[in-house]
Image (cartoon, rainbow, N blue to C red):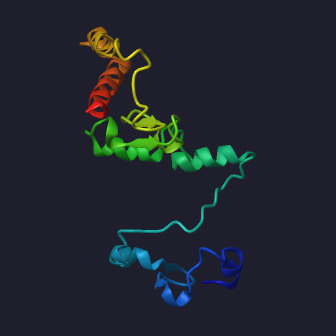
């Protein structure tokens, strides 16, 4: 641990003697010991700092660039969404933002993802007595349509069935 780190992070730093060697001044936390073999063979890496070639005027622009992780491109989807797209398949629960109803930038894109304040609050915003008829009507209204809204409706209705159970 560098002296500056110890001074600036006195409550979270671990002694250098406990760190797992990771090259140069870097070390892995002992709790990451199961990942150390992957680090050693190059299949697991750590991003120690991020530097943008272009200086952004606002922090939110820099954050958006980081969440897209596609420097120099016109990509408008998040890096994690692109990973999920390549992976294929999955349900709405393959990727969930929990604790906020806003999807983070890295999940923005066509792969199914959900943002929930909490699982217990996930429902259609209708009186519970109307819930079955409303779900049936939504499914019928979107059945057989080749449209992104139709697929999102099917995904959402399936997710609602899952959380209801």
Please tell me which residue lies in front, 98 or 83: 98
Relative side of 159 to 17, left or right? left
The percent coordinates of residue 64 (x first, y second) are 60, 44
Q: Quadrant of the N terminus?
A: bottom right
Q: Residue at x 27, y 12 (%)?
A: 136
The percent coordinates of residue 118 (x first, y second) are 45, 38
Q: Quadrant of the C terminus?
A: top left
| Image quarter of residue 2 | bottom right
Q: Is residue 115 above or below residue 50?
A: above
Q: Residue furthest bottom?
A: 17
Residue 62 seen in the figure: yes
Q: Is residue 151 above or below residue 29?
A: above
| Image quarter of residue 13 | bottom right
Q: How many callouts does the rendering have?
A: 0
Q: Residue at x 29, y 16 (%)?
A: 146
| Image quarter of residue 142 | top left
Relative side of 65 to 43, left or right? right
Q: Is residue 113 above or below residue 3?
A: above
Q: Residue at x 41, y 74 (%)?
A: 32
Q: Residue at x 26, y 10 (%)?
A: 140
Relative side of 122 to 140, left or right? right
Please tell me which residue lies in front, 122 or 97: 122
Residue 71 seen in the figure: no
Relative side of 90 to 121, left or right? left
Q: Residue furthest front?
A: 129
The percent coordinates of residue 127 (x first, y second) are 41, 15
């Amino acid at each position: 641990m560098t002296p500056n780190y110890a001074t600036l992070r006195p409550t979270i730093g671990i002694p250098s003697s406990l760190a797992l060697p990771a090259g140069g001044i870097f070390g892995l936390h002992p709790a990451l010991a199961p990942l150390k073999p992957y680090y050693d063979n190059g299949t697991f890496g750590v991003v120690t700092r991020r530097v943008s070639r272009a200086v952004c005027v606002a922090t939110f622009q820099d954050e958006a660039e980081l969440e897209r992780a596609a420097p120099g491109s016109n990509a408008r989807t998040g890096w994690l969404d692109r990973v999920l797209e390549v992976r294929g398949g999955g349900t709405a629960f393959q990727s969930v933002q929990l604790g906020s109803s806003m999807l983070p930038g890295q999940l923005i894109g066509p792969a199914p993802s959900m943002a929930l304040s909490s699982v217990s609050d996930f429902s259609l915003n209708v009186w519970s007595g109307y819930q079955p008829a409303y779900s049936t009507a939504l499914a019928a209204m979107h059945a057989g349509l080749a449209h992104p809204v139709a697929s999102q409706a099917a995904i959402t209705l399936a997710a609602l069935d899952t959380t209801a159970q």
